[in-house]
Image (cartoon, helix red, strand yellow):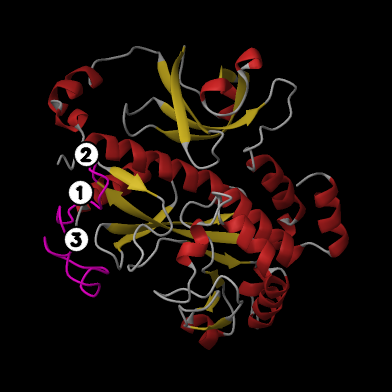
């Protein structure tokens, strides 16, 4: 069976001949948005007369929402509003990628536009200077619907040599990973690092630290770059939280730090925030699974470096807990904590909004958000 797509076999040097052609003063801008699944990305490109200097120079555009699970055919037009601009590593300078929010034509946020409400919460907690870092795990698949590089009729050797592994028998798909890293750096994504994960063909990249709304913007564009690069290599990047039953799942561990947590004696503030998260464990579990199904339940079993989805726990250096306090933080008595519950297919806007609300808003402020339908 084929393990890579037919399109990946096209002559890439031929493409480069055309990409290197001069384009005058014109600028190509690729609009990127989240579709009606809440998990997948769409994009399309238009020409501007000159290079935009900031986000205000890029006009609002529209698209057919009936083809992206976001509207009916009888009233299909949706608006995409640029909110964050990046350099384009595919068509190169001066061309741009812009992340967009999706709005209905009555100017209300689309159902899967969670950035809008997340940004409102982040503005409310701005004085706390909340930082996030998100660890995006994913699995590379062939078009034969098996993890990339796995035997056609069986399984590779058991878990053990693959985490941060080196060698053709341990690391499957490193070319994709390294190209993605460089593309993120070129684009201006705040990528922090990358590594091979516990299951073969599974990898991770980290984004952050970013303050407030920026973490969601940068993670979504990093995901977009990953999917585009996988097109060239003919493989698929899956965000399924539990690709195979008896192997490690894929999460999006979220590191959290406020100004108070980073100050001398900040461990007290970390412990206070963890206690607030304990009280609202079930709500966070619902938010952390973007599929609105049971994907994260398949992953959070209490096995394979996870806590049970039904129980809340926290400890220093324990990867089998809901919340891990890093060893160095325990020694320094300040820093950050890691929420290990979010699934790999989570919406980072929903995750970070929930954490900011639970840890930093008063009960009255939270009630106001709920009344606004957040």
**Residue 109 place in picture, x, y as percent:** 69, 33
User: Circle 3 — which element?
Assistant: loop
Residue 41 appears left or right of 2: right
Spatial CA distance of label 3 from label 1 is 10 Å
The residue indicated by pointer 2 is: 233
Residue at 57%, 18% (x, y): give it: 61
Q: Quadrant of the rendered structure where residue 188 is?
A: top left
Dot 1 or dot 2, earlier in sequence: 1
Do the residues bearing badges 1 and 2 touch, measured as CB atoms within 8 Å? yes
Q: Mark 2 or 3 closer to N-term? A: 3
Q: Is residue 369 left or right of residue 86?
A: right
Q: Check residue 69 in the rendering and tell me which mark sits there, or answer none.
A: none
Q: Which mark is residue 171?
A: 3
Other-residue count near label 1 (Cα within 10 Å), few / some / many at <14 / 14–19 / ≥20: few
Image point (42%, 44%), residue name? 223
Q: Which image quadrant for residue 357?
A: bottom right
Residue appearing at x 31%, y 58% in the figure: 203
Residue 212, percent from left and from top: 63, 53
Residue 276: in magenta span: no
What stretch of residues is rendered in magenta?
142-171
Mark 3 Cα within 10 Å, few/some/many (few <14, many 20+)?
A: many
- Badge number at residue 175: 1
Residue 256 makes an appearance in the image: yes
Tell me the mark number nearer the camera, choosing from 1 and 2: 2
Q: CA distance from mark 2 to mark 3?
A: 16 Å
Residue at 41% x, 19% y is 28
Does the magenta run of residues contain 151? yes
What count of labels does the image hold? 3
334 to 197, vertically: above or below: below
């Amino acid at each position: 069976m084929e393990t890579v797509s037919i399109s990946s076999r096209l002559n890439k040097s031929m493409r480069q001949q055309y990409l290197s052609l001069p384009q005058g003063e014109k600028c190509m801008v690729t609009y990127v948005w989240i579709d009606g699944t809440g998990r997948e990305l769409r994009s399309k490109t238009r020409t501007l007369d000159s290079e935009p200097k900031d986000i205000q120079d890029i006009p609002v555009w529209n698209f057919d929402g009936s083809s992206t699970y976001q509207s009916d055919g009888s009233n299909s037009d949706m608006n995409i509003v640029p909110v964050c601009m990046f350099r384009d590593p595919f068509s190169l300078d001066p061309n741009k990628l812009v992340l967009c929010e999706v709005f209905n034509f009555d100017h209300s946020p689309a159902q899967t536009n969670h950035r809008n409400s997340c940004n409102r919460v982040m503005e409310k907690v701005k004085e706390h200077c909340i930082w996030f870092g998100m660890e995006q795990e994913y699995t590379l698949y062939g078009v034969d619907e098996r993890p990339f590089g796995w035997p056609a009729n069986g399984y590779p050797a058991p878990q053990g040599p693959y985490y941060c592994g080196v060698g053709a028998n341990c690391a499957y798909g490193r070319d994709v990973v390294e190209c993605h890293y460089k593309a993120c750096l070129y684009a201006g994504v705040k990528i922090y690092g990358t590594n091979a994960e516990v299951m073969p063909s599974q990898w991770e990249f980290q984004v952050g630290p970013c303050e407030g709304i920026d973490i969601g913007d940068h993670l979504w564009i990093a995901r977009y770059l990953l999917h585009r690069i996988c097109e060239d290599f003919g493989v698929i990047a899956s965000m399924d939280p539990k690709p195979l039953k008896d192997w490690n799942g894929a999460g999006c561990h979220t590191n959290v730090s406020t100004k108070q947590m980073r100050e001398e004696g900040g461990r007290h503030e970390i412990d206070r925030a963890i206690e607030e998260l304990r009280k609202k464990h079930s709500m966070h579990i619902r938010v952390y699974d973007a599929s609105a199904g049971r994907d994260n339940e398949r992953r959070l079993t209490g096995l394979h470096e996870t806590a049970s989805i039904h129980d809340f726990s926290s400890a220093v250096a324990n990867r089998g807990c809901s919340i891990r306090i890093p060893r160095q933080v325990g020694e320094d008595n300040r820093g950050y904590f890691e929420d290990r519950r979010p699934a790999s297919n989570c919406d980072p806007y929903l995750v970070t909004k929930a954490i900011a609300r639970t840890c930093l808003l008063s009960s009255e402020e939270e009630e106001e958000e709920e009344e606004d339908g957040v």
